Image (spheres, grey):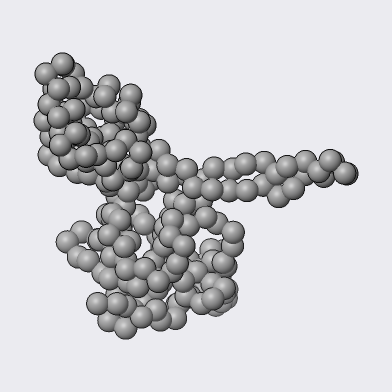
Amino acid sequence: MKKNLIPIYFFYFIVIYGFAQQRVTINHIQSRLITNEGIEFIGELMDVNDDLYAFDSWDNEGVIFIEDKQYSLGNLNFNVTTNKFNSRIKRDQLFLYNTANIDAISINNHLFKKMGDSFYEVLYEDNGDQLLKRYDVKYKAGSVSRLNGSVGKPTVSLEFRYLINSEEEIKMIELTKKSIMNLMNNAQNMNIFESFVESENLSYRKEDDTIRMIAFILKNS
């Protein structure tokens, strides 16, 4: 069920002291995105800018999870630059969601959950163990012109970091053979794991395959 985006509400206050009336305005306007069904999401409007997004298109299937309720929206995107979520209201205008009360957001079946103040994609989750993916922006300085010494515009690209979140600890992991093999705690488990990788024809160069490998280790550790 997709929700249509409806106008934003703004507010001002009037305060009366005795016979004098003073009009008071707030210096920050908090907006509400209202759907046809009367559902309200708190946030603020922002102009389209050069922020980097997880998905190339705004034509996405999104679901917002708040407590035991789910709300489906068709134009959600994850702003990697700010680690926030936006909906496109107009061609040149976005709605930035206040995520204080949002538990999780799914976009095109990619589930993002909050850990601390940041959102991570959940690649695997079972019995208190999670494999998480953090989206970051990688900046590369512009090249220097040999003709006049001017510096070109810097470039940005997506960068990913992976974490295992378990009851015991949170640790970074690289999706490489060495890093994954270091999760093994004894030779017997190593042999079982290698048999699993071989029988399933898994590759350390494919993210989906390495996710399956790590999930296998977490289940059997």
Image: 170 above or below 206: above
Q: Quadrant of residue 200?
A: top left
- State the residue in front, 37 or 127: 127
Q: Going 46% across and 71% down the picture, which residue do you hit? A: 88
Residue 178 as seen in the image, left or right of residue 140: left
Quadrant in which the N terminus is drawn: bottom left
Residue 194 as seen in the image, left or right of residue 57: left
Q: Going 33% across and 61% down the picture, which residue do you hit? A: 107
**From this viewpoint, which residue is outermost toward the right?**
148
**From this viewpoint, which residue is outermost toward the bottom?**
36
Image location of residue 142, percent across then percent down: 70, 44
Image: 140 above or below 170: below
For the image, the number of numbered tags is: 0
- State the residue in front, 110 or 11: 110
Image location of residue 55, percent across then percent down: 43, 60
Residue 126 visible = yes
Residue 13 visible = no
Quadrant in which the C terminus is drawn: top left
Image location of residue 185, percent across then percent down: 18, 18
Residue 107 as seen in the image, left or right of residue 185: right
- State the residue in front, 131 or 95: 131
Q: Going 35% across and 73% down the picture, which residue do you hit? A: 74
Image location of residue 79, percent across then percent down: 46, 56
